Amino acid sequence: MTARAAVTLASVVAALAVGACASTFEIPLETPIQPKIDTSPFERVLVVGFIAGGSEDVDVNLETVRLLRSQLRTKSSMKVIEADVISLAELAADRPRADGDAAPAQTIDPKTLPKQIKDEKDLAAYDYVFANANYWKKLGEEFQSPLIVTGTILFTPNASSGFVQHDREVIDQYGRRTSEPVRAYMERKGFILQPKFVFIDGRTGAILNSEVFRESVLYNPNQDTPALSSYFELMDRLIPGFLGTLTSQKIRGTRVLLK
Amino acid sequence: MMRKTIASTVLVLALFTPLVDAGGPRGEAQAQVQFGIDVAQKGLWKEALYRWEKAVELDPKYAAAYNNLAIAYEHEGMFEKARKAYDKALELDPKNVSIRQNYDFFKEINDRASRRNPR
């Protein structure tokens, strides 16, 4: 009995000793990241449309407006305005000269705008559209001064050839399964998605923020991935960055407290 | 036998009791730091922040207190204050791996938050 008591006591002492010596404490931490734009003056948000180019397999303008509106409906406190999607490229090319239209009269001749947007250079020709504060202010007045989301999007096919490493399963002489790296020459195809999101104050027509993203994906030759699936795959990666401009986010991690 | 065991227990406890000068600034600061850790573990970060602010006031050379204070600032989204507190903690204890690791995690988040707008 005495021996058992001694053992118990020793265990208690050991536990106390360890406790007394512990000087670090790992603790979970949620770090808040503030949005890049103060959205408090806006009760509504209007995802108006994008100047889009690249692949013709996907209506990138329409799909992007739909996707962003649906994300903002669940993840933002602003009311999402359901309005017709504007084709900004057509608007810029058709009627660029009148005051309040999508182009400042003194700088751009609509004949110089590329009919088909195939690459970044073609898209850059339309950049002036976002600087036309009169146009955006006028649009804002129609929808009770919302935060306007617009921009450019390029969704282009991509191909790359070269050596690709992958693991191959091997069964050795004893029947054990192992994997070994194998290098093979492949011609892979995929897509590149390059959006530039522009956030405009619907009260003044001024640009509040703009942010450029780039994501790409390549598939093995045996994969037959439709362009629309690929578009959504790439947009999924970009959405957190887009939402981070408008809504606060929390990053989970751990830190060590010290004594 | 029993008497010997009790004597050894008392001796061991005495040995492992932190050598705290309860009346000095470090002792008071340590008490604040410990209290801060207890409440932070219960999710009461504002109270923890207050305790660790007090601790560094009491003992401005207490690296652990600055480290904890930096973490509390991070939790409250006060990144500039967090950075200064981490800097101070590392200045006081440059070889402390835990402080360095905390600071590295913080910097990664801070860089993301303050990334320049590529307008």
Image (tube, coloured by chain):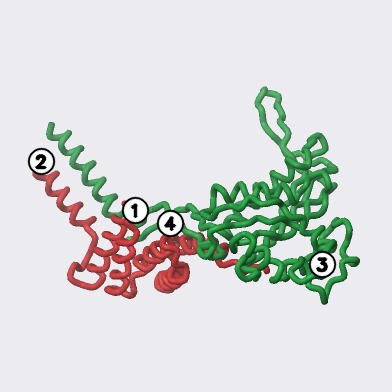
Chain colours: A green, B red
Residue receiving disc 2: B2
The x, y position of residue A193, in whole percent, is 75, 52
| Front label number (2 vs 3) | 3
Left of B1 or right of it: where is A112?
right
- Whether the residues at callouts 2 and 3 have beta carbons within 8 Å, the answer is no
| Front label number (1 vs 4) | 1
Return the residue nearer the eye: B116 or B3.
Answer: B116
Q: Is residue B101 visible?
A: yes
Same chain shared by disc 2 and disc 3: no
Left of A56 or right of it: where is A9?
left
Q: Amino acid at mark 4?
A: Arg
- The local crowd at label 4, few if under 14, some if 14 to 19, many if 20 or more residues have their Cα within 10 Å, is many
Residue receiving disc 1: B43
Q: Amino acid at mark 1?
A: Gly
- Whether the residues at callouts 3 and 4 have beta carbons within 8 Å, the answer is no
Give the CA distance from mark 3 to mark 4. 55 Å
Tag on residue A96?
3
Same chain shared by disc 1 and disc 4: no
Q: Amino acid at mark 3?
A: Pro
Return the residue nearer the eye: A177 or A68.
Answer: A68
Same chain shared by disc 3 and disc 4: yes
**Chain label for disc 3:** A
The x, y position of residue A214, in whole percent, is 72, 56
**Chain label for disc 4:** A
Give the CA distance from mark 1 to mark 4. 14 Å
Task: Assign the C terminus of chain B to one quadrant of the image.
Answer: bottom right
